[in-house]
Image: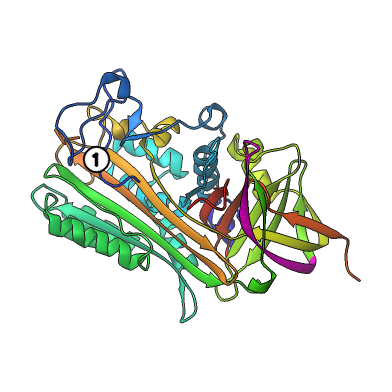
C-alpha cells in the first residue's frame, strides 16, 4: 500500500447533477452528448460537445493535469482532485475526496486491462488487492459513532437484474467494501425512490437526490459520507457580529461572523497563507482554514497538488493568541466529474469502444457518469457535512504570558479542509461568498 498507512496514521491535512449522463468518447476522443433519459430523444447540437450532463465542466488546470507528479496514495489523490476541482472557481464549492475515492475504487474493481490501469494510476495503487486494503483501511480507521456525534461511510451496489452482472463481482464488493448489494429493475420508479431513500438514510436526510435510469444501465455504484459533531470549544452566539466579506472580484456582502480568541495557539504561516485549525469535541475531527495573505488569492495555492499540499501541510509553526473571526456558512454543491476525471488521465473507461469492464460483466460496458453532491453547515455549535458519489456503468446503446496576537479574520475567499482524527481527508471546500446558499 506504499505510503498509505503512514499517511493515514500521520496528519494528512489534504484538503451532481443527478440524472443526465455523458456519452462515451468517439474514436477521435471528442466528448459527445447523448440525450438524457428524461428529456427529448433528439441529440444535442454539436456545439454542445463540451457540456457534461447539462453543466459546463472545465478541465483541470494544465499544471494539475499535465505537470503533476504520480499519485502514490490517498493523500496524493485527495490533493490532486481537490486542487483540480476548486481551481478558478468564484462560487462556494466543496468536494469529498474520500467519497469519490470509494466510488472509483469499486469502479476500478469492475474494470480490467488498460481501463483498470488508468483508474489505478489516478488512485495511486498498483493492484486490485492493494486497492481493497487501502479502502478497507479508510473504512476501519475513520468511522466513529456515539450518541453525540457521527462520522460514517456507506457503499452500495445496484445491479440491473435484467443484465448479466457477475456474482463474484457482487460478492467481492460486498465483502471488501462493506457494500449493500441490490438486484433491481433499473427503469423503475420504485427503484429510483429506493435509491434516493438509501442516500437520505445514510446522510441523515441532508441529501435526497432524484434518480432516473434506464434498462441499459448495468451498475450504479454509490458511496456516502456523513459527519456531525460539535466544536471542542463552541462559539458564543452573543459575540456574533455582522460585517463585510470581500469577494474575489472586489465586491462585498454582509456576513454574520463568529468570534473567539484562542490563547497560546498554533498557527502555520507560509509566504502566501496562514492556516489555523478548529477541532470537534467528540470525534476529534479537524477543520483547517487556509487564508490567503494580502496580495494573494486561493488560486495561488490551487495551481497544482504540490502547492496545495504545502498550504495544507507546510508553513512555519508559530504560537499566537489567535483572534478568530469566522463567518457562519452553509451551502450545497453538485458536480458531474466526467470531464475532470478525463483531464486527469481516466480516458478508456468513458470510451464505449475501448472500455473494459470484464470483471463485472461479459457484455460491453462503459462508465457513463460520475457525479457528486455535497452539503455543509458551520455555525456556533459545530459542523454538519455530507457527500454522495454516484458512478454509473452502462451497456451499449444507453440513452443518453500570552503570545503576540494574530488577527485571523476570514473576511475574504478562503479554503477549508475537514479531516478525521487520524488525518484522513473527508471534505475540501472554498468559501467565496458566505451568504450564498
Residue sitting at x 16%, y 51%: 166
Left or right of residue 337, residue 380 in this image? right
Asked if residue 265 is positioned above or below residue 90 in the image, the reply reads below
* Above or below 333: residue 85: above
Q: Residue furthest left?
A: 162
Q: Is 174 placed left or right of 362 in the picture?
A: right
Secondary structure that dominates the magenta span: strand
Magenta stretch in the rendered image: 247-264
Asked if residue 433 is positioned above or below residue 387 in the image, the reply reads above
Q: Is residue 167 magenta?
A: no
Q: In the current view of this chain or complex, which residue is farthest to the bottom? A: 147
Mark 1 — residue?
Answer: 357
Q: In this rendering, is residue 434 above or below 205?
A: above
Residue 348: x and y in percent read: 32, 31
The residue located at (47%, 50%) in the rendering is: 97
Measured from the top left, where is residue 428 in percent x and y? 53, 51
Confirm whether residue 121 shows in the render.
Answer: yes
Q: Position of residue 354 (x, y in %)?
A: 26, 28
Colour approach in the figure: rainbow
| 122 or 44, nearer to the observer | 44
Depth check, front residue: 412 or 53: 412
Q: For mark 1, does the 10 Å Cα neighbourhood hold few (<14), some (14 to 19), or many (20 or more) residues?
A: many
Pick whichever, 179 or 223, lies toward us.
Answer: 223
Residue positioned most to the top: 28
Judged left or right of residue 289, residue 350 is left
Q: Residue at x 20, y 60 (%)?
A: 193
Does residue 358 appear anywhere in the picture?
no
At mark 1, the secondary structure is loop
Amino acid at each position: 500500500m506504499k505510503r498509505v498507512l503512514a499517511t493515514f496514521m500521520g496528519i494528512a491535512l489534504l484538503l451532481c447533477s443527478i440524472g443526465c449522463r455523458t456519452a462515451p468518447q468517439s474514436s477521435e476522443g471528442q466528448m459527445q452528448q447523448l440525450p438524457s433519459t428524461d428529456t427529448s430523444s433528439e441529440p444535442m447540437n454539436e456545439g454542445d460537445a463540451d457540456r457534461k450532463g447539462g453543466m459546463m465542466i472545465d478541465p483541470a488546470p494544465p499544471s494539475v493535469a499535465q505537470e503533476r507528479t504520480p499519485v502514490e496514495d490517498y493523500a496524493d489523490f485527495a490533493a490532486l482532485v481537490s486542487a483540480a476541482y476548486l481551481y478558478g472557481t468564484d462560487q462556494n464549492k466543496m468536494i469529498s475526496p474520500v467519497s469519490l475515492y470509494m466510488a472509483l475504487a469499486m469502479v476500478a474493481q469492475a474494470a480490467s486491462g488498460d481501463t483498470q490501469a488508468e483508474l489505478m494510476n489516478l488512485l495511486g495503487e498498483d493492484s486490485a488487492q492493494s486497492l481493497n486494503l487501502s479502502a478497507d483501511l479508510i473504512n476501519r480507521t475513520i468511522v466513529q459513532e456515539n450518541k453525540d456525534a457521527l462520522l460514517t461511510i456507506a457503499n452500495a451496489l445496484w445491479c440491473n437484474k435484467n443484465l448479466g452482472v457477475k456474482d463474484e463481482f457482487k460478492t467481492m464488493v460486498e465483502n471488501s467494501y462493506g457494500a449493500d448489494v441490490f438486484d433491481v429493475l433499473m427503469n423503475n420508479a420504485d427503484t429510483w425512490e429506493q435509491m434516493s431513500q438509501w442516500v437520505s438514510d445514510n446522510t441523515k436526510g441532508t441529501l435526497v437526490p432524484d434518480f432516473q435510469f434506464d434498462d441499459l444501465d448495468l451498475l450504479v455504484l454509490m458511496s456516502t459520507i456523513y459527519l456531525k459533531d460539535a466544536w471542542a470549544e463552541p462559539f458564543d452566539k452573543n459575540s456574533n457580529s455582522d460585517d463585510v466579506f470581500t469577494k474575489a472580484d472586489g465586491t462585498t456582502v454582509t456576513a454574520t461572523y463568529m468570534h473567539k480568541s484562542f490563547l497560546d495557539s498554533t498557527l502555520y504561516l507560509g509566504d502566501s497563507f496562514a492556516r489555523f485549525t478548529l477541532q470537534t469535541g467528540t470525534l476529534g475531527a479537524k477543520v483547517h482554514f487556509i487564508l490567503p495573505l494580502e496580495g494573494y488569492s486561493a488560486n495561488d495555492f490551487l495551481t497544482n497538488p504540490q502547492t496545495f499540499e504545502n498550504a495544507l501541510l507546510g508553513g512555519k509553526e508559530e504560537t499566537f493568541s489567535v483572534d478568530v473571526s469566522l463567518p457562519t456558512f452553509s451551502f450545497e454543491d453538485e458536480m458531474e466529474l466526467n470531464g475532470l476525471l478525463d483531464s486527469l488521465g481516466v480516458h478508456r473507461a468513458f470510451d464505449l469502444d475501448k472500455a473494459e469492464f470484464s470483471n463485472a460483466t461479459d457484455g460491453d460496458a462503459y462508465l457513463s457518469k460520475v457525479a457528486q453532491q455535497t452539503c455543509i453547515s458551520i455555525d456556533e455549535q459545530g459542523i454538519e457535512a455530507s457527500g454522495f458519489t454516484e458512478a454509473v456503468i452502462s451497456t451499449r446503446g444507453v440513452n443518453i504570558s500570552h503570545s503576540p496576537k494574530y488577527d485571523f479574520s476570514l473576511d475574504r475567499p478562503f479554503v477549508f479542509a475537514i479531516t478525521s482524527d487520524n488525518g484522513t481527508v473527508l471534505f475540501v471546500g472554498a468559501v467565496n461568498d458566505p451568504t450564498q446558499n
